[in-house]
Image: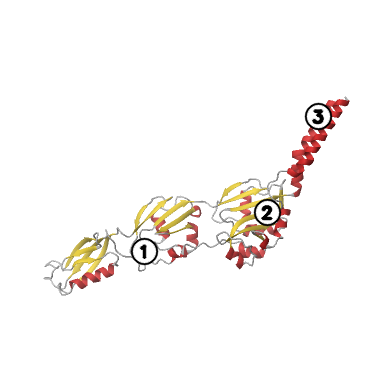
């Protein structure tokens, strides 16, 4: 019996040693609220990120959606106003009227003649009594005037009309996640980005999950279709030989820490608030979460932070600053603030563990096995 008691005591002693050594290796799920607050008190120059406490003022300055603008190269295009020109392969209908029935192109029945012509590989069309007329790179009106001037002194008071029959050179391509991809002509009046998408049957995915990429020569830029709808300046004029690619690219955010669903989540609506994102991730874990330690990590525009009066660290990544937004749900106003703070693509939400949760974890991992073994030893002694 003494041996059994000695064995139980030895087992307990060994487990106590494990327990004491294990205190320093207790696994965690991320920094605690206390650790985050400690880092927050450091000067901006001493860390590589900035921390913003969410309150009414910061929500007003930083809580809204960030406007997105397409590359200025695309926004400056005026195609459709004065940029349409003819090119090789275009087919023209040239109508010539004369004031007399005995003119070069008139007959007893009609004072008009029609000539169908295609712009050849040299960029020219042939018109009788005028010869080869340079057409490629010119507007329809300039071609009409050139033909009319070439007929003066040959035809009787000639009047010329030029109409585009087949638009071959002025077209663009639409590919990707649209219902009817293909090549589409650009009309004389021009066409804008959303018109092009509509001509291709529209995007297969919802607008807020679709991204348009425009390729024009060496210039390339992307924008989501909902940003085009909300900001008319992004609905740019297209140019010949442009390529538009529509891709299904939903916005996502990641939730980590003491939340019920640690995962990557897709936006289910065009505008998602922080409160809705927390609900999508199952909310704060009642047994583990520190309600005062809700954080959102984002690479924020340095210009936007500077305009909001936020002290910035020296570190920049493509003119963006690693930013941590902090919200304390122990305060009732936090629920209203969370509803007013808009999420962005690739945001990361982290909820810190409560201090008591570490004790719970300590008991579950180390103390409970000790108690179980102690009970087993007591049975053996008895």
Q: Position of residue 220 (x, y in %)?
A: 44, 58
Q: Secondary structure at mark 3?
A: helix
The one nearer the camera, 70 or 104, is 70
Q: Position of residue 129 (x, y in %)?
A: 15, 68
How far apart, in angstroms, are the residues tagged by discs 3 and 1? 85 Å
Q: Is residue 382 visible?
A: no
Quarter of the picture holding the N terminus: top right
Report helix, strand or loop for mark 1.
Answer: loop
* Residue behind mark 1: 190
Figure quadrant of the C terminus? top right
Q: Is the C-beta separation of discs 2 and 3 under 8 Å?
A: no
Which residue is pictured at 83% across the width and 32% down the height?
A: 10
Sequence-first tag of 1 and 2: 1
As drawn, is 205 to the left or to the right of 345? left
Quickly name the residue at label 2: 294
Badge 3: how crowded within 10 Å, few (<14), some, or many (20+)?
A: few
Q: Nearer the viewer, mark 1 or mark 2?
A: 2
């Amino acid at each position: 019996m003494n041996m059994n008691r000695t064995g139980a005591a030895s087992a307990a002693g060994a487990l106590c040693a494990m327990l004491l050594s294990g205190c320093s290796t207790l696994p965690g799920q991320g920094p605690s609220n206390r650790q985050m607050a400690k880092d927050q008190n450091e000067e901006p120059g001493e860390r590589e990120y900035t921390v913003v406490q969410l309150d009414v003022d910061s929500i007003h300055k930083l809580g809204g959606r960030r406007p997105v603008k397409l590359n200025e190269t695309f926004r400056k295009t005026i195609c459709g106003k004065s940029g349409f020109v003819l090119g090789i392969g275009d087919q023209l209908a040239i109508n010539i009227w004369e004031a007399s029935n005995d003119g070069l192109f008139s007959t007893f029945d009609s004072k008009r003649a029609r000539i169908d012509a295609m712009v050849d590989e040299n960029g020219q069309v042939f018109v009788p009594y005028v010869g080869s007329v340079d057409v490629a790179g010119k507007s329809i009106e300039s071609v009409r005037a050139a033909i009319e001037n070439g007929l003066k002194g040959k035809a009787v008071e000639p009047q010329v009309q030029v109409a585009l029959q087949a638009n071959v050179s002025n077209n663009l391509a639409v590919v990707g996640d649209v219902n009817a991809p293909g090549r589409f002509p650009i009309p004389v009046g021009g066409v804008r980005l959303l018109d092009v998408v509509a001509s291709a049957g529209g995007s297969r995915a919802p607008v807020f999950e679709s991204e348009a990429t425009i390729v024009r020569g060496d210039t390339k830029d992307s924008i989501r279709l909902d940003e085009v709808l909300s900001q008319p300046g992004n609905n740019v004029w297209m140019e010949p030989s442009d390529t538009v690619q529509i891709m299904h690219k939903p916005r996502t955010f990641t939730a980590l820490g003491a939340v019920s669903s640690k995962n990557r989540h897709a936006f289910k609506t065009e505008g998602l608030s922080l409160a809705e994102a927390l609900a999508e991730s199952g909310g704060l874990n009642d047994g583990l979460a520190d309600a005062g330690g809700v954080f959102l990590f984002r690479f924020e525009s340095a210009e936007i932070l500077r305009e909001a009066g936020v002290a910035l660290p020296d570190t920049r990544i493509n003119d963006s600053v690693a930013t941590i937004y902090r919200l304390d749900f122990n305060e009732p106003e936090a629920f209203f603030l969370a509803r007013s703070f808009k999420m962005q693509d690739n945001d990361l939400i982290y909820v810190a563990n409560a201090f008591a949760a570490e004790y719970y974890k300590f008991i579950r991992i180390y103390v409970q096995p000790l108690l179980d073994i102690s009970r087993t030893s007591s049975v053996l002694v008895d």
